[in-house]
Every structure is written in structure tokens, then in C-alpha cells.
Amino acid sequence: MSALALAGRDAGIIAWRNLLNLGRTPGSVIAALVQPLMFVLLLAYVFGGSLGGDDYRVYLMGGIFAQAVTFNAAFTALGLANDMHKGLVDRFRSLPTPRSSVVLGRTLSDLTMSTVTLTVTALCGLLVGWRTDAPAHHVLLGFVVILLFAFAMSWVGATIGLTARSVEVAQSAGLIWLFPVTFVSSAFVSPTAMPGPLRTVAEWNPVSATATAARDLFGNVPPAGLGPGDAWPVRNALPYSLLCSALITVVFMALAVRRYRRITRG
Amino acid sequence: MPDQSHAITAEGLTRSFGDRRALDGVDLAVPTGTVLGLLGPNGAGKTTTVRVLATLLLPDGGTARVAGHDVVREPDAVRRRIGLSGQYAAVDEKLTGRENLYLVARLYGMRRAEARRRAGELLVRFRLEEFADRPSGSFSGGTRRRLDLAGALVARPPVVVLDEPTTGLDPRGRADTWDSVRELVAEGTTVLLTTQYLEEADQLADAVCVIDRGRVVARGTASELKARVGGERLSVVVPDAAHRVAAHAVLSALGPHTPEAGERGLVSVATDDGPAALEQALPRLRAAGVALGEVTLAPPTLDDAFLALTGRTGTAAAGTAGDGAPAQDDPAGGDAPPGAPEPVTPPTASGTAPRHAAPVGTPPPVPTGPPGPARHAHRPRRSRTVGRGTGDRR
């Protein structure tokens, strides 16, 4: 078996084990689902009224999807930190399995979790008035774009989880960066209303591109005043989002796997 | 250098963590099919050695080969041939016993059906059937260790490394683990095990390396080491300070070992033949008018071994005060009728005496005298042995 095929096979086995774990920890699954639902309801009804009502609720969901899967990176960080500090990573590392398989298995199981999150969030969106009249293959492509971004963010979480000195550090460090990253974006509001430098950051933020690409594909037109701006990444949201996802995946995959190997160095 | 006759060789292994030197030139050679006991107190470098041999940690210097493969250059080849059971049972608490073993078997490259069959076999062999389908988070410490050990044997590795396999186990769990190790050896497996108990090394190991501060300070068979350490230790508690000099003189006259005075009237001496020494000592002590509080005959502790092999106790190495025994540990010769200790072990061939003195499942010294107070006479020494807090994990 080639090294790559072996890594894939073993990652699948690790992912199976992670999902079995997840299924037996209903509390953490519920927590992962409650968080996006809470954001849907808060933004749809607390902010939605001031921001455009029904039109805003249709617009909102693209941003919520991008934000929800970004937050799942925190689960990757926590999951790997837990495995490491409970000695399970030692067990795995004493086995003849490729160095990348444990981390890849974790990001794959978290990708599965992101799919569940996305499904539940979409159903909730339909309840608050989100609609799409785009062709089915556009809608599907929209979700694929979001999941590719989820996979990329998961590798960022993996790097954090493997770097953290303790589970507690992994938990807080894995979560804290997500707030600025998801809020300084066009996920919920228009960057055009932000002060200069912040606007630039928001326009170039991959979260913005992913939300905008999804909205474009779902045929969800932003209400007046909530336009995503006119910078290059905004006008080319779909290719920019795919490019960012690919880039982040490659860079953080290398970092996380290198970090995993480095454990050998104490 | 590749050496078929040795399953494990290490030469000059060094490893530092910051400015702490965990391994300071460790040399090991374990002949194929034998058991090496790596004996030492906490922080001596046992776990670091194990982690280097199991490819979990890179050494700073030196070389090590396991089953013919270099741990640094060919880690994958080593991993395919080594089974590791660490100091902290690495089982997935949410998975059942069966799922844990299945997971490990799959990661060794077995197909689904083969992995299922192997998991089933190991559950039977380690008497884990009743736990097979319960989440392992609910297991007792001993059961978890057994599951972890079973996990180490999934791929029938020719070399098995066990890091303090009985630490924290009750006597039953310890006896089970010892039996498992003996079975492995009977099958021709090479075993390296670390332990803090001289008795455990004596029970299981063909050869023993005593390790301290990252160096091997003594090596040999258990009986060779015991010859250097002395056999069982004869200890008497003399409540009356005026009698202690006489007691010291009597024990000294037994020869060839020199008695040592402990706290609270304890006078102890190593013996070559414990029961014989006891038979000689008691009448002489009585004749010398020494009133005795307690009398014990016990296998040498790790501390005794350290004292004999390094000239200092294991805890002196740790920099902890040697006399940390709380006062209530010593009943000050209270209840035992002075001068009337009961006879101890039935006289047997001296070589086997320690095994009788300490039945399977009790590596720490077992008092062979009156069960109650006699136990206390030894407790201070034990508490010193366990007094070192710094784990050498990572």
C-alpha cells in the first residue's frame, strides 16, 4: 500500500473512532449544534428587525453557515489536545501508522460534524424564513464551498490543539481567535460601514469570501446597505474562497503534521 | 553491530529536558527471549528510556536497536515489532474493551475480520470477556491496565516494553500482570519492564539493571544483585535506648554485613540467610538482655538495594529528607510482648526464602513477624521509597 493510501486508510479508522466517541458524548454534539442555532435566532430576531427584517434573515444565513463551520475548528483543537494529554496519542504513535493519520482522522471526523452542523443550521434557517430559488447544483456547490472552508479551518484548530500545553489552553486558545475572524467580515453586516483599515481586513477575510460566495450561489441578494463592498476578493468571492481554503489547508496541514512529529522531540 | 542474539541494545543513550539530564549514558543489552528488569526510583530515567526505545522520544545522543532496527533511523520497523504498555493506561474511555483492541488491531494494518478475531482472542486471554462490551472508562485501574497490556500484544510483537506494569494495582491485579508476563516469556517474547520493586524484578526478570540519575549503576541477575544487597533484612526495634548498643553488637556479630540504626530504635542488618540469622540472633539478643519491641524479616527494599549499590538511599538521590516518616507510623514498640517475637518463615533453602516471605502479588516488603505492629517497623522505609514526586514522563 502506498504511503498516501495507508495514511488515508488509517485516518479513516481514526475518524471512525472519533465519531464513535462523539456519538457517546451527546453533550458535546448538542453544544456544537446549539451554538449556530443560537446565532441564527439572536441575529435573525434581535438584530434582524433593525437591519431589514425578512430580507435580512434571507441574507443572514450565508454568513451563519460560514461562521458555524469556522467555530468547529475549536472542536478540532480540543479533540486533539484531549487525545494528547490522555496518553492516547502515545499509544497511536507507538503503532506503525503514518504520522499524518491521527491528525487527518481528526479533521475528517470534524468535517463530518460540520456537515451535521450545516444541515441542522440550514433547517433552522428555513424555519426563520431563509429561502433559495437557485438551481440544485448551485445550492450543492454552495455547501461544498462552505465545507471546504470548514476543512481548512479544522487544520488551523489542529495546529492550535497540538501546540497547546494543556487541554484548558487548547480550549480557550482554540475559541478566542474565532470571534474577531468571524465578526470582522461580511458574515453579518456590510464591511462598507466599517472604518477604513477594518473594512480592508473584512473584505479580504476568507470568511467574507465564503459567505459571499455561498450567498451568490444560493441566489440570496444582500438588502440595500448590506452590500459586501467592491474589493477584488468580493468581486471574485468564489475563486478567492476556494483559493484561501486550499492555501490554509496546505499551510496548516504542514504545520500540524510537523507539530505532531515534533512531539518525538519532547 | 546488528546483533541477532539481543532483541534490545542501547549504547550511551543521553537525553536532557532543559537543564535536567534524564538519561546520562544508558547502556542496555537484552538477550532475545529474556526479561530485563529496569529498576530505579521515580525520576531515575526509567520512563525516558522506555520512551526512547518505543520511538516516542528521540535521544540526544547514543544509539538503540530494537528487534534489529535502529529506533532513530527506522522507527516504523521498530513500531511494527514492539508492544508498549505505558505507565498510564492509554485506553479510549468512550470505547468498549473490544473496540479499543479492534482499533489498535486495525492500526497495525489488520483487515476488519482479522482485527475482530484478534480482539476476541485477547479478551479471552486477559479474562476481559465480561468487560468486552462496556465502555472502558468504567473499568477499575487493574482492568484498564490489563486492557492496555492486551493492546500492546495485538500484533504478537517479539519485543514488549512495560513501564511500571504493576504500579497502582491491587495484589490481585499485580498477580495477574505477573502471570501475563510469564506467559509472554514462555512464548519466547523479549520483555523489558521497569519497576520500583526489587521483589518484582526478582520474580520476573532474568537480569536486572539498576538505574539512577539517568545512569545504570549496577547490573546482573537478580540473585547476583541480591548477593550484593544482602538477602532478607532482619530488623529489630529496641524501645530502650540503653539496649541499642548491645543490639547493634549482636547483629554485627552475625556478619558479614554491618547493621544500621534507623529512627525510633530501629536496628537492621542485611543477611545472607534470613531465617538462619534470625534463629541465631534471637537467643543472643535475649542473652544480652535486650528488650525487643518488634522483629521483622523482610526482602530488601529498593532503598536497601540503593544503599548497598550506590552507598546512598534512593531518596537521598532525590534530595528529600530521609527521615520523613510521620511519628504515628511507629507505635514505639507498643503492643508486642517484648522479647517474645513469633518465629517467622519456615526454614527453607536460602535462595527461595524471599519468595516465601513475599507471596505472589506483594512486591513491597511483607513483614514475616506478627502481622500487626511488625508492619509498622517497615513502613518508614517504604514511605521514603515512594517519597519522590517528580515523574520522569516527558
Image (spheres, coloured by chain):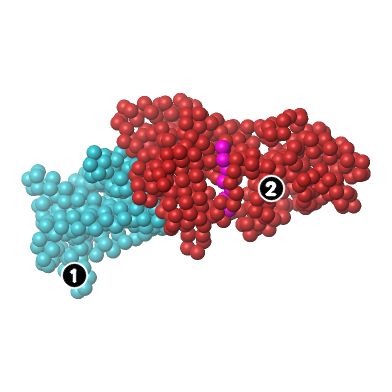
**Which chain gets the cyan colouring?**
A
Q: Secondary structure at mark 2?
A: helix
Chain under label 2?
B
Which amino acid, mark 2? Asp
Where is residue B190? Give x, y as percent.
48, 36
Mark 1 residue element: helix
Task: Residue under label 2, please give it.
Answer: B304
Residue A200 badge: 1
Please indicate whether residue B216 sits to the left or right of residue A193 in the image: right
Nearest the camera: B283 or A111? B283
Q: Which residues are drawn in magenta? A: B206-212
- Expressed as whole percent of the image width and height from the top left, the position of residue B113 reads 31, 27
For the point 10% across and 61% down, the residue is A236
The chain displayed red equals B
- The residue positioned farthest toward the front in the image shown: B1
Question: Outermost residue, left direction?
Answer: A135
Q: Between A231 and B5, which is closer to the camera in this rendering?
A: B5
Frontmost residue, A22 versus B25: B25
| Image location (x, y in percent) of residue B391 | 54, 52
As drawn, B374 above or below A185: above
Which SS does the magenta portion mostly show? strand
Q: Is residue A127 left or right of residue B74?
A: left
**Which residue extends farthest bottom?**
A196
Relative height, residue A98 to residue B118 (above, below)? below
Looking at the rendering, which quadrant does residue B365 occupy? top right
Q: Chain of mark 1?
A: A
Residue B175 falls within the magenta-colored stretch: no
